[in-house]
Image: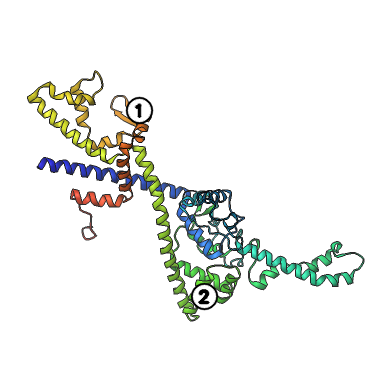
Amino acid sequence: MISLISYYADLAIGLILAFLLLSLLVSGINEGIVKLLGIRSKFLWAYLRDTLDGAETADGTSRLDRILDALKRLGRKARTPLTQAASPEEGRSRLPASVLGVFARLPFGRDPRPAFSRQPPPAQSPPLAAAADSVAADSVAAEQATAGQATASAEAPAGASADPAHPAGQADPEEIAVLTVEPAAVGAAGGVLPPDQGKSMAELLHERLQEIDHAKRGRTSIADIPPARFAVAVMEIATEHGGVEALMRDLDALKSPFSQPLKAVWDRASHDLEAFGRGVEDWFDGEMERLSLLYRRYVRWVLVGLGLIVTLAFGMDSLEYGKTLLRDNAYRGAVTAFGQSGPQALEPLREQCEPGQDPYVCVTDVLSTPAFVKIFTHAPVSVTMDAAEGPAWAWHGGDWWQRLTSPGHWPGFLITLIALLFGAPFWWDILRRLSGLRARTSGSTPS
């Protein structure tokens, strides 16, 4: 009975330890990819661009976005017409809207982060402008073009009467200067400028945070903004812009989604600046919690993909581990019976030995290798350490592929994949409880 309990304990500890190590490997690969590609920073600034600057134009999307849209439409079997993929008036979000976008668009699509700057925050920020490739930028350009045409039409009769010798198409430079409307004047009248004459709301926010920034391929690496610092930055931008109400008016003109929560907070604060700052801080804190939940949901799918790759790469069959442990115990029983039954007791072990190999040497190798170690011996590449010759590499691609294509191993692969999704902290806690390890508490830490 005690021996049976020992077998089950060995099985449980071995599986838990294997799941812990593989979970740590999956987490490490995920963190490496996130750091290398700046996923967290891109995710945050994609949200800030959408919230502060509004949607981006559909025709300004990258080739990768168009390929992803084509794949999604193909998957839906053209359920949505092509012209409804992204309306020019409404634009599209910069955040990924699908698992495919998490794997492709966010890492390799257009970078939503502002450009990095080594300069400290300026004493006076540039004026507010529409973000490039945004719906607001197209709207500002269209309004300026309409205003220019209207002014030209109004001035055309006066120009014709002043110089009837040539038509308006052949006007003198002085007349062109009279008929042309300066974009800066249009922007000053509405408080909103074209993209090349100012900075967007997200870029103005980055100016207030760039003193804690460092470069990441020429872009900002900020992946976390404290809510209190965000509220102070918004107050600073509003002060330079002529007040909170002037900022809200111009954000409304830019069709910024940020104008609505800003108005709600301003009204709830009864136009009190201190209460308004606290309200913006609370609002941004809630938005970051919601964004974190969305990010974790997307990362969960990434972990599923990485867990599947790691499981198949190691050929980790959890069910086979139990069979290996029981088989090793049977081998040990056969060796124990060798002293009483003679050499015939080693016959069941000859299947594990190479042809012509000394069965005694084979038994030593089989029983000296724990079942836990055998879990990781099914990878396509293996290495053995020899004290005299050093490491020796071996390729087992054929056996590994045969193992993957064998339906008998698929249930064990599935169990391993599901186990890895629980994460390394879960398996460490289980191992600690099962083995009796105690976590260090704050009371036992020396002061």
Q: Describe the element under mark 1 as helix, strand or loop.
A: strand
Q: In the rendered image, is residue 18 in sight? A: yes
Task: Judge whether residue 204 can be spotted in this image.
Answer: no
Residue 178 horizontal side relative to residue 226, left or right = right
* Mark 1 Cα shell of 10 Å, populated few (<14), some (14-19), many (≥20): few
- Residue 374 position, x and y percent, is 26, 35
User: Mark 2: few, some, or many residues within 10 Å (few <14, many ≥20)?
Assistant: some
Residue at x 19% of width, y 31% of height: 367
> Residue at point 90% right, 64% down?
166
Q: Secondary structure at mark 2?
A: helix
On the image, the x and y values in percent for residue 52 come to 54, 65
Q: What is the distance, in whole Å, between disc 2 and disc 1 at their CAs? A: 67 Å
Location of residue 209 with respect to 409 vertically, above or below: below
Residue 226 placement: quadrant: bottom left
- Residue sitting at 41 percent across and 49 percent down? 302
Q: In this rendering, would 43 be left or right of 425?
A: right
Number of marks in the rendered image: 2
Q: Nearer the viewer, residue 203 or 307?
A: 307
In the image, what residue type sits under mark 2?
A: Lys
Residue bearing the label numbered 1: 394
What's the residue type where badge 1 is placed?
Ala
The image position of residue 116, as x and y in percent, is: 54, 55
Relative to 218, residue 356 above or below = above
- Answer with mark 2 or mark 1, whichever residue precedes in sequence: 2
Dividing the picture into quadrants, the one containing residue 161 is bottom right
Q: Outermost residue, left direction?
A: 340
Which residue in the structure is indicated by mark 2?
A: 263
For the residue pair 148 and 114, the one nearer the viewer reads as 148
Residue at the location (42% across, 67% down)? 286
Q: Quadrant of the N terminus?
A: top left
Q: Position of residue 317 (x, y in %)?
A: 29, 39
